[in-house]
Amino acid sequence: MAVEEESASGAAAADEARSDDPLIDVRNLQTAFFTDKETIRAVDGVDFQIDSGQTVGIVGESGSGKSVTARSLMGLIESPGRVLRGSSVRYRDLDAVREFAELFSKRTVAVEELAARYDPTEVFGATDATPAEFGHDDPADVPVVDVAAAGYTDEVGITDGDECVFVLDGDVDSPASIRDGFVEITRLSGEAQRKMRGGRIAMVFQDPLTSLNPVYTVGNQIEEALELHQGLSGKEATQEAAELLEAVGIPDARRRVNEYPHQFSGGMRQRAVIAMALACEPDMLICDEPTTALDVTIQAQILDLIAEIQESRDVAVMFITHDMGVIADVSDRVNVMYAGEVVESADVGPLFADPKHPYTNGLLDSIPGGQVGDKLSTIDGSVPTPNEPATHCRFAPRCPKAFDECESVHPVPTPVDEETDDHTAACLLYPDDVSTEEAVERHQEQDRRGDRQ
Ligand code: SF4
């Protein structure tokens, strides 16, 4: 079969494979802070994915690593902290890849052009690649997109729908920062990370005052974001800023666009910050405890607003909170974090109906909701500072189900039973349909091999 024809079918196969790809794919994320006395492993080997338009909740007590996870995704970790080598945060977006290629003066080329000068004999003669690993006997049958995506040529292939673009020279910004249709955020330079931040991923913090400058009007600040990310200025930007304020439910937006942050109430300030985030037209919104500083009625309004924005704009949301009640309201999927690790991950229904990890059970038991006068359940003790590599279960000192091996074996995320693969718990009691001895051995083996679910 001609290379060009085969390339087209290869591109189609790649497209098919990628239709299920998440918007953001976080693997083995490790972020540490280095002080004179110790190394604090604030995020220690975290994995999760977020699909387009999905809301993923990250929940846990203070000190569990939730906010550091969010800041790591945004490239906002400052010295003495850093994201460690081996961490991967991949962001899928053809436009972003093209934009980065242009930003760093790299040339993109259509797949047909690439296919026309693709010489399979040369590729397979000069590398350790074999046609068999691509499912073919004859080198000429291997699609050029597959060869490029596997990293056997200098070109890096990306596909989306009917389009296929190749970035010539894999060294875009830094080697392998763009690969296989994803931007590897952890390998982007500061300038490129800034482009990513705001333009693709926007963040809403707990305290809106930290995001708003007191000496500029709210309108000015939204206009600045519009100019930076959408190239709007003058009357057009002012008009759009007022419309965004209206869209987030600020009454009398055309007048209030000229007011300063101190003239807004707490709830209105948070709405203004959300309007600023939307000005960047992000694909993903990271909300870090966005309602914690607000009273209960305003909190409910802001949660409704975020849900409405997500639905109308098809934005993915990563929602961070310590409040299990809020997580139940907003999330499609939940990751429970403890001492830098994800200890349970499941869709919201199964997680609340049948929580598996003893820590998740403790968090759910401590939700207020019984009779007046009932004593609230608590988890004794506090989250330890993860300042050593994990060699045991960090929850063991607080766990009501702890047994001897919990002090010497590090549990890794594992399906809770052999039938399920999208509900995992990092606890030696799982999978629960094998004996505890066998479960412990599996964790030991996986931890030794560094396997990640
Ligand atoms: S591994 Fe042991 S200590 Fe840790 S959560 Fe499971 S039972 Fe509790």
Image (cartoon, rainbow, N blue to C red):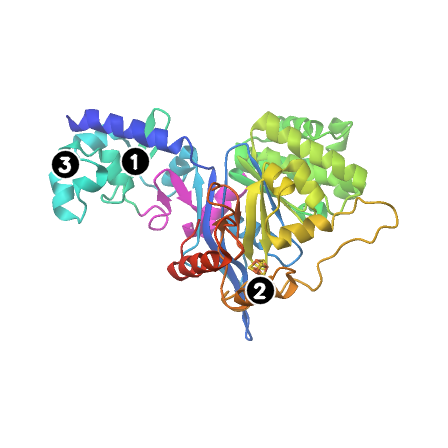
- Which mark is drawn over residue 166? 1
Residue 300 on the magenta span: no
Residue 183 among magenta residues: yes
Q: Residue 210 or 4: which is nearer the viewer?
A: 4
Q: Give me the disc on residue 137.
A: 3
Q: Which residue is mark 2?
A: 403
Q: Is residue 160 left or right of residue 430?
A: left
Q: Earlier in the sequence, mark 3 or mark 2?
A: 3
Query: How dense is the environment of label 2, judged by Cα within 10 Å: few (below 14), some, or many (20 and up)?
Result: few
Residue 241 percent coordinates (x, y): 66, 30
Classify residue 247 by image quadrant.
Answer: top right
Q: What is the span of residues highlighted in magenta in the rendered image?
A: 171-198
CB within 8 Å, label 1 to label 2: no
Q: How many marks?
A: 3
Q: Is residue 233 left or right of residue 437?
A: right
Left or right for 383, reference 168: right
Categorize mark 3 by other alpha carbons within 10 Å: few (<14), some (14-19), many (20+).
Answer: few
Is 173 left or right of 329, judged from the image as shown? Answer: left
Three-letter amino acid code at disc 3? Asp
Give the CA separation, mark 1 to mark 2.
54 Å
Which residue occupies the foreground of this view, 158 or 442? 442
Rendered position, 331 above or below 397: above
Q: Residue furthest front?
A: 435
Image region (quadrant) for ligand 1: bottom right
Outermost residue, bottom direction? Answer: 37
Specify which label sits upstream in the sequence, 1 or 3. Answer: 3
